[in-house]
Amino acid sequence: MIVFTVVVLLLAGAVGGAIAVGRLGMGGRWLGYQMVPPDHVGIVERRYGRVNQDGRFRRITPYDTRGLQARSLMPGQNYWLPPWLYRVEVVPRVDVPAGMIGLVTAQEGAKRSPSRTLGKYVECDSFQDGGAFLLNGGEQGRQLAILRGDNSYYINTSLFTVEFAPRTHVPTGTIGLVVARSGGVRPPDQPFSRHVECDNFQDGDAFLLNGGEQGKQMAILAGGTSYDINPLLFEVTTVDTVGGSPDGLTADHLKEIAIPVGHTGVVITLDGREPGRGEEGVGPLVPDHRSFRLPWVFLANGGRRGVQEETLGEGSVYALNPWFVRVVLIPTRLLILEWTKKDVSQSGNFDAALGQIVVNIQGHRLQVEMSQTLQIPDRAAPKLVSRFGDTATSGSGLGGLVINPGPVQRFVERVLGGAVETYFNAIAAASTIDEFLTMYDSTRMELASQVCQALDEWGVEAASTTLGEFESENPELDLARQRIFAEQMRGKELSEQAKNKLIEARIQKIQNATDKEIRLLDVAVLERQIELLGRDTVAMRMFLNELKEMKVPEMISGDAGALLEYLPMQRALEMIGVARQRAEQVALPAEQTERSEDSEDD
């Protein structure tokens, strides 16, 4: 009876082996030689044998004992498995598509620690070596390690189940924020978990082994890249997944921060050490944090919370963590601020609080419009933000780029507007209406000086101050001012005419002096001629010169009567007399000089 039973069992095993070989489709023989087809894996179950004595493994065994085996059969290899002793099931391999990752759950393994939500990492050839997984301490449940996409894996699907999830993609021009679901517990006074190097959160094992903590992470994921991140370990928020964030996070917070030309970015850090005693104003420069891109370096080097001295330059783009920094745009271009009547549409202007200037002097209300050109340098912007604040978002706990005219508006209203108002109040109290209206030029210059002084205390540069004409609410005063202005213009005109007369008189004086010098020069020449040629000769030459200028024919034939037709005798005698008289006048001083010299010789 016993022999019969054994024979029956052997026959049953042989039949089962034949059936198994037939399922493999490899034409295996009764002796149990089997080959797994391509793109498949063989799962082995031992029918008979000793029972596994290791109490850790109840369903799947890493040993060659009865039950499902942790090992699996790879394609392209020959295996001898007696069909009466082993049953082999062939299943397709696991293909993880491109753009996806594989999340693994172990059906067997050690119990994991209650402090961890995922099974620890063990070396097992990407879960293809089930025996190594179990013997090296692999834990049951969801696993820390993942399967990367666009790859195939020969995995024992009785030991491991695999589900697919998309890779984490961060669009270009944006960032990804990370929250760790597992890890150590951070101190209650720290808003961020400590930073650990973990290949952009793709190496979950390194994150946990190096002391990674649960909660918000300081490091961000740069845009334009996809990451193989285990979503069971890290929650990543991108512009595509932000949705209705409970902390008010929006897609705008996740955009890279671009500083336009003509602006500077004032940085407000939302974490850092508290200012000590005597540490007031903006936070000092901190080295090596790469413009706040490395928050952990900023904190490690003693960075303070609040407004920072270091600013973000124009024309640059920064990928910053909005949980860590807030950036306030401050214009550094030339600003033209106007004291004019405003309407609701101008409420966002930097000069929204500057209305038309009204001065009350001796009961007369005067109105005037004014404009001021100024420039806020980069170095002055942090102090301005620190003093006049960013109240629009200061209570949100979130950072990112803030486009809010509030800080500059408050500076313009309180500093610039206050200086102008103080000046006009003082001058109105100390002047009469006539004095005020007649000293317009000095008023403009004094006002420009006071504005420049007020802005200089904040490091702001004043470019130009333009003061318009005063207008009165009383028409009679305007008429009186027009008359005064007309008289002033008439006085200026007469003054210019007097200046011109003085200039003409000076010119005439210079001309007279020049003529006198010319006459003296002629006399000197004539004296020299008389000295050399004699009076009669010089007189005759002068007569001939006069005659030359007259309209007398070049040649006259006949008697002297023809000459008298052109030169009357009386005129000729007069010319000769004048020439002789001039020669005598010149010769007389010369003779007197000679006598004086002779007497001196005697």
Image: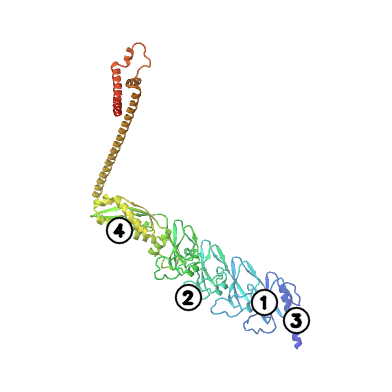
Q: CA distance from mark 4 to mark 1?
A: 90 Å
For disc 4, the marked residue is 422
Quarter of the figure that contains the N terminus:
bottom right
Q: Could you say which disc has been placed on residue 71 in the image?
A: 1
Image position, residue 209 (x, y; %): 56, 74
Q: CA distance from mark 2 to mark 3?
A: 69 Å
User: Which amino acid does the dot numbered 3 rest on?
Assistant: Leu
Does residue 11 appear to the left or right of 310 in the view shown? right
- Within-10-Å neighbours for mark 1: few <14, some 14–19, many 20+: many
Q: Could you say which disc has been placed on residue 187 in the image?
A: 2
Q: Nearer the viewer, mark 2 or mark 1?
A: 2
Upstream in sequence: badge 2 or badge 3: 3
Residue at 69% x, 72% y: name it.
Answer: 74
Residue at 45% x, 74% y: name it.
Answer: 189
For disc 3, the marked residue is 11
User: Which amino acid does the dot numbered 2 rest on?
Assistant: Pro
Check whether the beta carbons of the residues at disc 2 and disc 1 lie within 8 A of each other.
no
Judged from the image, the secondary structure of the residue bearing numbered disc 1 is: strand
Q: CA distance from mark 2 to mark 1?
A: 44 Å
Image quadrant in which you'd find residue 515:
top left
Upstream in sequence: badge 2 or badge 1: 1
Judged from the image, the secondary structure of the residue bearing numbered disc 4 is: helix
- Within-10-Å neighbours for mark 4: few <14, some 14–19, many 20+: few
